[in-house]
Image (spheres, rainbow, N blue to C red):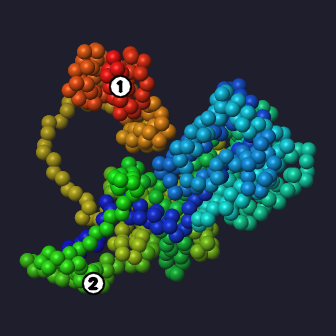
Amino acid sequence: MSDWRSHYHNDDEEDQDDAEDNEEEIKFAGRDSLIFLIDASECMFEVDSETDISPFDLTLQCVHKVYTSKIISSDHDLLAVVFFGTQKHKNSVDFKHVYVLHDLDTPGAKRVLELDGYQGKKGNKMFKEDLGHSRDVSVGDALWACSNLFSDVKLKLSHKRIMLFTNNDDPHANDSSKARMARTKASDLRETGIILDLLNLRRSGGFDTSRFYRDIVSQSAGEDGGMQFKESAKLDDLLRKVWAKDYKKRTVTRLNLKLGGGVELSVGVYNLIHSARKPAAVRLYRETNEPIKTKTRWFNGETGSLLLPSDTKKAQVYGQRQIVMEKEETEELKRFDNPSLVLIGFKPLSLLKKHRHIRPSQFIYPQEEFITGSTTLFSALLTKCLEKNVYAICRYTPRRNTPPRFVAMVPQQEQLDDQEMQTMPSGFHLTFLPFADDIRKISFPKSEKANQDQIEKMKRVVQKLRFKYRPESFENPVIQKHFRNLEALALDLNEPEEMEDLTRDPGGRGEKKVKVEAPLGEEEIRELLKSGSLGKQTVPVLKEVCRRYGLKGSKKQELLDVISAHFSAH
C-alpha cells in the first residue's frame, strides 16, 4: 500500500500544479493568437536622426524579439506578420497592397530568419525589390485580411489581437471613403472580440492620434485599452508596450472576498512572480525523433498481475500500526473549506514584519463579470486602506482540497512610467503569514562584541557596497545562456549571442581566471587524429585550427570533419 501523504500537495509542488493548469488551459480555453500588422510605406524607412534607425527596422527588431521569446516560453501561441502599403500583394481575398508574409501559425526558426533578411540597408533594399512600396494604402483592407487570417485557423482561439505598427497618423487624409471603411471594419473587429492595438512610432512633426486612429483602435475598459499616446523611438520602449499588451493575465483562481454581514465581492488571484526554470527535456524515439509518451502501471509484487486503481488503498503507519483508509476518506481529510478569502480584521502596516517572508506573495484584482459592483467595492476598500495605512488579515483557501492559510492583504497604488505605461497595478498583495509552527527559535553561541573602531570601519565598508537592488535588472545567467545556445542552434548561427553576466562583480574581483589554451601545432594535430582524441579539444581550439588552414565550419562535428579531411588529403 502506498503512503496516503503522497496525495497532499506542498509548496514545492505548486510549480508542477501550475504547469498542469497551463496545459489544461491551452487545451480547453484555446490558443492565443497575435498578428503584427506593419506599415510598409516609404515613410517607415526614413532613418531617425537621433536613434540612427528607421521605424521599419525598429519594428522588425521588436517582432524578432517576440518571435524568439514565444519559441521559448509560449510555443503553442499563433503568430502572423502582415504588411500593408506594399506594391505587391498576397492574401486570401486578393486585396491590393496587402502582403501576408506569415500566416497564423506557431513561431519557428525559418520565420525568424526570413524577418532578419529584411533588416538593415541590404534588407530594406531586398524588401523594396521583393514587395515594393505604395502610397495607395487601405487600412480597412488590411484589417479585413487580418480578420480572414483568424477565420482560417481551424483551432480554437482564446485571445485574438492585432498590433498595428505605423508612423503615419493620417493614412487617409485625402480619401474619406477609405477612412470611413476602416472605421467600420475596426468596429466589426471589436464586435467579434478581436482587439486592435496601436504601436505608434516617432516621425518628424509628431504623431496625432486624434486625426484618425482614435476611432480605430480598441478602447475597451480596463487592461485592454489599446491607445498609446506617446510615440516610440527606442526598442526598449516599443518592447515594453508590446509585452504589456501581449502578456497573459491568467488567474490562478477566482473566488469571493467575504467582508462580513453577507457582503461579498469577486476577485481573481494572480502570480506576479514565478520561478523561471529551464524547460524539461523531451524524450524522443531514436529512430524517428518523434516524442514518446510515458505510461506508469502498477503490478502485484507476488502474482505479477496488473493492478487497477480500485485495487489499491492508502495507509499511514501510526504507533506501529498500519491504518488503512479508503479513497473517499483521504479526500475528505483534505477538505477544510470552500475556496474563499474571508476578512478577519485590520492592522497597521508597520506591524507587518518583512523577515517573516515564507513564499512569494500573490495579487488580487476585482472580477466584475461574476459579481456586479465588485470593482466599485474593491476600489473603495483599497482607497481606505491606503489612506489609513493599514493591511487586512484574511483566511485564504485557494482550492477545495488545499489547507487554509492566513494572509495579509497589503494595498498597492498604481504607478506609471514616463511612457504612461503601467509599472505597478493597483490592488492588493496577498502576503502569506507564518503559523506558530513555522517560526524557528535558534540559539546562537555568545561571541565577542566588536569595538567602536571596528564598527565604524565596517559601516564604511557597508556604505560603499550599498546600491538600490531591483530584481528586474538581473537576468538568470544559467537560463539566458541555455536559451541563447538553443537559439544559435535553431537559427544556424556560428556562435550564440553574447551574454553579460550581471551577477558578476563589475570590478572583476568575483570573476574566475580564464584559462588560456595554447594553439595546436601540426604534429600535435596529426598525433591527436591518429589516437582519435581530437574530439576532446574545445570548440575555440578547433576553430583556431580551421582559421589557420582556411577551413570552414561552425558546429563541433563539422570542425572535426573538415580538419580530418584536410589532414587526410595532405
- Contact flag, marks 2 and 1 (Cβ < 8 Å): no
How many other residues sit within 10 Å of disc 2, few (<14), some (14-19) or many (≥20)? few
Residue highlighted by disc 1: 565
Q: Is residue 264 visible?
A: yes
Disc nearer the start of the sequence (2/1): 2
Q: Would you name the residue on which mark 2 appears? A: 310
Q: Quadrant of residue 447?
A: top left
**Is 6 displayed left or right of 105 in the figure?**
left
Quarter containing the C terminus: top left
Task: Specify the quadrant that holds the N terminus.
Answer: bottom left
- Callout 2 secondary element: helix
Alpha-carbon distance for marks 2 and 1?
Answer: 63 Å
Circle 1 Cα neighbour tier, 10 Å, few/some/many (<14 / 14–19 / ≥20)? few
From what the image shows, is residue 344 above or below residue 179?
A: below
The residue that appears at 65% across and 31% down in the rendered structure is 123
Please name the residue shown 42% across and 70% down the image.
398
Drawn side of residue 537 relative to residue 98, left or right: left
Kind of residue at disc 2: Ser
x and y percentages locating residue 372 in the rendered image? 63, 74
Residue closest to the eye, 426 or 339? 339
From what the image shows, is residue 202 above or below residue 323? above
Q: What's the residue type where badge 1 is placed?
A: Ala
Q: Position of residue 315 (x, y in %)?
A: 19, 78
